[in-house]
Amino acid sequence: MAGGEGELKLLGTWASPWAGIVRIALHLKGLSYDYVEEDLENKSDLLLASNPVHKKVPVLIHDGKPVCESLVIVQYIDEAFQGNGGSSLLPADPHQRAIARFWAAYIVDKLVVSWVQAFKAKTEEERLEGTKQMAVVVETLEGALGDGECSKGKPFFGGDSVGYLDVVLGGLLSWLHGTQALCGAEFFDADKAPLLSAWAERFGALDAAKAVLPDVGRLVEFAKVRRAQQAAAAAEAAAAAAEKK
Amino acid sequence: MAGGEGELKLLGTWASPWAGIVRIALHLKGLSYDYVEEDLENKSDLLLASNPVHKKVPVLIHDGKPVCESLVIVQYIDEAFQGNGGSSLLPADPHQRAIARFWAAYIVDKLVVSWVQAFKAKTEEERLEGTKQMAVVVETLEGALGDGECSKGKPFFGGDSVGYLDVVLGGLLSWLHGTQALCGAEFFDADKAPLLSAWAERFGALDAAKAVLPDVGRLVEFAKVRRAQQAAAAAEAAAAAAEKK
């Protein structure tokens, strides 16, 4: 602990991109914390008590008080530890803050949804629809980096230093690097999205990214096994339901 | 205009609950604004230029600079016009802010999704599943009001005065009052959710709510017509697709 901030505990899983977002933010703010790896098949009493509504990771517990939902947690970290680790994640100007929040919502609503659609596709048609949507997202983010609304031609969405939007997209980085292996399409394509690809390299080279983000190969293996297990469980449930009829 | 805040213009539609959320916030902050009713079948060039990513209402344009996405806009209004209309919508304490943001996300992700599921259901089974999910949401919100995490037993989620979460839920109020007519189940049930029902009465009695929220009967009629049109268009598209095969 950097001292004076109280006790911080994070409940997460190593593969959770949402927990990754929070860990990146904690690292950038120079905050140390106890990390508790949760087993989602057998959730701890602490997780169930701390996030009774969603029962999901990540949960940040600060001096005994839980904060849930990754984007809410990152904003909490930024507001509760102002001045830590240098600059704030969200800019001071209200309009720039609104732009950062707009794009963070876009990443959750559009990028993640299209990615998951491609990843969980049951048919080639569904997969292609997911990757098509994802290509639109990539083009849109490339435009956001290019037209300077977010980054004004600077190295990060946050400008010269990493900001809120960098943290949100950066927390997903290992999963995005696994897109080809998991969804059959590249996410970062230096020809189609040179600015976004250069951003991904810059972000991945940060100490915070190196310290926090999981190994892409391990993640891809984990995701493939999990998808196969879920498909098998779904097929079993469908067969059981058909037998009942 | 209350003076000194610059020019505010809101692009919305009378029936949009998301535009309603923004209008409630503007009213509570004592801000006057030009309101532009959009025709979503024939969107204005201003809307398309102001929200090129989603092309949706609401958009708040402040001195020529657009802000999109209702929850982002409400936070923008709160931050850009600090001190207007008395108190802030979001509390000052970071943990209380996180709680308000958590529940606002819950309303968007769980309440609205279950409501829409019940509203758009194609079968009785789907409708029942939607209303079942909605009942869980109501019970959860009733708990949030009851256990005092948000409201601490005070009249609003924001405490003694209306806060961020009140604005987000309150903007949806006319739609929620139309739940019985549109989804075949009550949303506010004084027996099952007495605190939430009392909150709805209190919120509906506010000047801001009376000034902004659409008439429930008109809304229900509009929604029924629109649902029928969409169902007819979907059936037509399906028939055309079948003919092609």
Image (spheres, coloured by chain):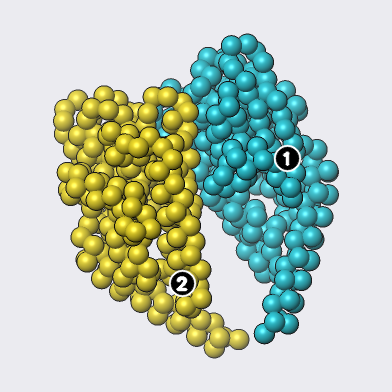
Chain colours: A yellow, B cyan
Q: Nearer the viewer, residue A240 or A135?
A: A135
Classify 10 Å Cα crowding around label 2: few (below 14), some (14-19), many (20 and above).
many
Residue drawn at 70 percent across, 25 percent down: B34
The total number of labels drawn is 2
Q: Is residue A203 above or below residue B124?
A: above
Spot occupied by residue A35 in the image (x, y as percentages of width and height): 21, 47
Spot occupied by residue B69 in the image (x, y as percentages of width and height): 56, 40
What's the residue type where badge 2 is placed? Arg
Res. A167 in view: yes
From the viewer's perspective, is A204 left or right of B21? left
Looking at the image, the residue that sits furthest to the top is: B3
What's the residue type where badge 1 is placed? Glu
Q: Is residue A20 above or below residue A125?
A: above
**Residue for badge 1:** B38
Q: Nearer the viewer, residue B201 or A98?
A: A98
Q: Chain of mark 1?
A: B
Res. B196 in view: no
Looking at the image, the residue that sits furthest to the bottom is: A243
**Residue for badge 2:** A127
Spot occupied by residue B242 in the image (x, y as percentages of width and height): 70, 81
Residue drawn at 28 percent across, 49 percent down: A198
Q: Chain of mark 2?
A: A
Q: Quadrant of residue A119?
A: bottom left
The disc at residue B219 is none
